[in-house]
Image (tube, helix red, strand yellow):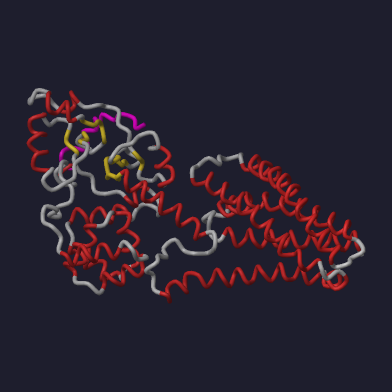
Amino acid sequence: MNDNTNGNSNSHSNDQLSHHGDPTAGPTIEQDEQPTQAAADLAAELQTLDPETAADSLEQSSDEVAAEAVAILEEGEVQPILEAMDADRRAALERSVSPELARQWKINTEFDEDTVGRSMEPPIGFFSKTQTVGETVELLRELVKTEPVTYCFVVDNARHLTGVLMMRDLLFSDDKATLESIMIPKVFALRAEMSIAEAIQSVADRQFFAYPVCDAANHFVGLIRGQRLLEQQAFDLSAQVGAMVGVEKEERLATPWWRSLLFRHPWLQLNLLTAFLAAAVVGMYEHTLTKIVLLAAFLPVLAGQSGNTGCQALAVTLRGMTLNELKRGQTRYAVIKEMVVGFCNGALVGISAAVGMYIFATIQHNDRPGQLALVTWLAMVVSCVVSGMCGVLVPTTLKRLGADPATASSIFLTTATDVVSMGVFLALATWLLL
């Protein structure tokens, strides 16, 4: 909840409001004029493309059509495209849109990626606290013709957010009453530097159409639509699945094949490198496999079960990190929990695997089916315990290193589970059977 700021600083006068334009005004794009069909089609196409491909598409369009198209898009969709554009083409595009929209783009670039400030729209529907009800109603009648005004906000001369208006109060209050006398002084607002994930958490119990955005000094700097937050959350969750296996979140279905190749190939090379580690572990026990060939048949079983156990722990951990449920100091608890779950799962699944090994060894006329079954059960338990632990430690370690916790986490997890499951299985077989 934002603190109520009365903005009694006289050093900022109406000059600051005039610097930003009329406090009731938003972008000067003529939104009452319908965009051309070409612009609408281009905007729809841009929404299906990754930023680099979208930037290429914009650069092939005329300035007028491109400006209309980006004006249709939301700020969070525009920023990645602008960053991918050639500097000269971007400057030409900024000259083709309204000064207010161009200014908002510049403001948004001051904030980090995946923050509220990066996705906010220009502020609209805000009024000076000294204005009267009658003046405000007249301004609103004109403003709603071109702007989607949902809420009315009150600011002081320094553009500090000081209150919010209820439409009922505007309708029934005396025309000569000032907005300061009828406003609700305590306003919930998002901070521009907040991450989208933090914003989603903070608005979970506040179902508003739009939220005001303020900077650290409580200046009203923009709006962000509730729908935009939900869309961003859905996009982040869907991108998280791809990031786990090395697919960049920018990649879309319509991304050209050569760009998809550039996005994915480096991670596959990394995956191959890590796979060599697992192969090296198996190679260390070549003598054991030569003596007991049927062990090779159960290597994929161990790797598959431990890998699935690790992925379950990874999914729960990433979900907790996304929802900010994994607080500082709770990693140890999460690790212990997943190790316990892994032990129980490993013990139960290990019984089935041990029975399978016993039957298989008997069919193959091996003279020690019981010992092989015991080795299989022990290896399954140890592998699942370690896999559960890795499912927590891999994303949390990546986060501590400043990387995206979801980025290729599945690749690192798979390597760990393969090395442990195969190594433990073959080591136990060597120790107990040879």
In percent of width and height, residue 7 lies at 25, 32
Is 119 situated above or below 69? above
In percent of width and height, residue 429 lies at 85, 61
* Predominant secondary structure, magenta span: loop
In percent of width and height, residue 430 lies at 87, 63
**Residue 19 visible from this viewpoint:** no
Q: Residue at x 32, y 57 (%)?
A: 77
Return the residue nearer the eye: 168 or 162.
168
**Residue 370 visible from this viewpoint:** yes
* Quarter in which the C terminus is drawn: bottom right
Q: Residue at x 34, y 52 (%)?
A: 118
* Quarter in which the N terminus is drawn: top left
Q: Is residue 177 magenta?
A: no
Look at the image and give the residue range highlighted in magenta: 1-16
Is 130 situated above or below 319? above
Judged from this view, the residue extending furthest toward the bottom is 258
Say which quarter of the image contains residue 180.
top left
Say which quarter of the image contains residue 96.
bottom left
Could you tell whether 69 is left or right of 383 in the image?
A: left
In percent of width and height, residue 347 lies at 76, 47
Return the residue nearer the eye: 55 or 377.
377
Say which quarter of the image contains residue 167.
top left
Q: Residue at x 75, y 70 (%)?
A: 280
Could you tell whether 159 is left or right of 276 in the image?
A: left
Q: Is residue 10 magenta?
A: yes
